[in-house]
Image (spheres, grey):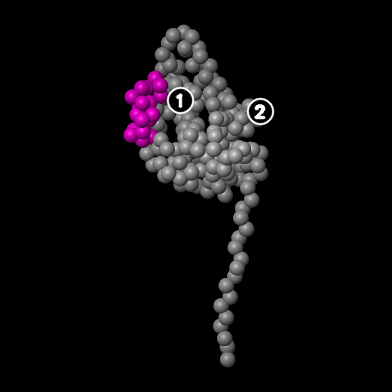
Amino acid sequence: MSQSVNIQSDYSPPARPTPLILDSLPNPAHIEGCSLRVQQNLDLILLALEALELGGSEYMLATAADLELQGIIENRVVLWRLRCTNPWRKSYTRESLNLTQAKALSVIASYRARQLTVLIRQLLLAQQQIVEKGLPLEQHFRLSEYLERFRAHFRSRMNPKRAKVAFYLSHEEELNELALSLLSKLLFCTGTSGMTRLWISLFDGEVR
């Protein structure tokens, strides 16, 4: 007589190791997760990168693949969900980034900024020269293009019911200043140890 035997395996695939590039970023002391401010700043930095180059989100995904971060950012949907931890977003998910996810986004931002270093420097230099001459920023085509794209992204994705968002939406000059300050942050993370500097700066003043 034959008997059928059901064997259930207890095997489960091993957890993916943390990509080595993330190990280069220190864990902030006494902080286990990310505050809303950190999540907001990361998303805004990525928003600025999108305004700098067409297809910005695709470049971010390609960078994630190049740096072997697919275990954290598998596809476009995952990237979108991580960015929707920004409380200013219309699609805010009320979820929180863990430190590994935040590190992955910071690394991607730093690598994309490095690829765009020349452009970022050109735009910031143009801003300085235009301000010194007392001319409107729209006088410089490439700078005007960046600001226009940033404003369009901000308007389409951020929740106008948020007080600070509403302020920016009703004060274009302030929104331009936000876009320019993000350019400075991107330049800050392009040089030697820039990735680490960006990461540490996100947690400046954080108290838990």
**Residue 101, quarter of the rendered image:** top right
Looking at the image, tell me whether mark 2 or mark 1 is earlier in sequence order.
1
Q: Looking at this view, is 132 or 29 the one in front?
A: 29
Residue in the picture at 60% in, 63% down: 12
Q: Badge 1 is on which residue?
A: 179
Cβ atoms under marks 2 and 1 closer than 8 Å = no
Q: Which residues are magenta?
A: 158-175
Q: CA distance from mark 2 to mark 1?
A: 24 Å
Instruction: Give the secondary structure at mark 2.
Output: loop
Q: Picture coordinates of residue 186 (x, y %)?
A: 55, 28
Q: Residues within 10 Å of mark 1 (few under 14, many from 20)?
A: many
* Residue 80 in view (yes/no): no
- Observer able to see residue 98: yes
Residue under label 2, please give it. 192
Determine crowd level at label 2: few under 14, some 14-19, many 20+ residues with C-alpha closer than 10 A. Answer: few
Point out the image quarter for the N terminus: bottom right
Q: How many numbered circles does the render carry?
A: 2
User: Picture coordinates of residue 77 (x, y %)?
Assistant: 46, 47
Image location of residue 200, percent across then percent down: 60, 32
Q: Viewed as shown, does residue 162 lie left or right of 192?
A: left
> Which amino acid type corresponds to the residue marked 1 in the rendered image?
Ala
In the image: residue 32, left or right of residue 55: right
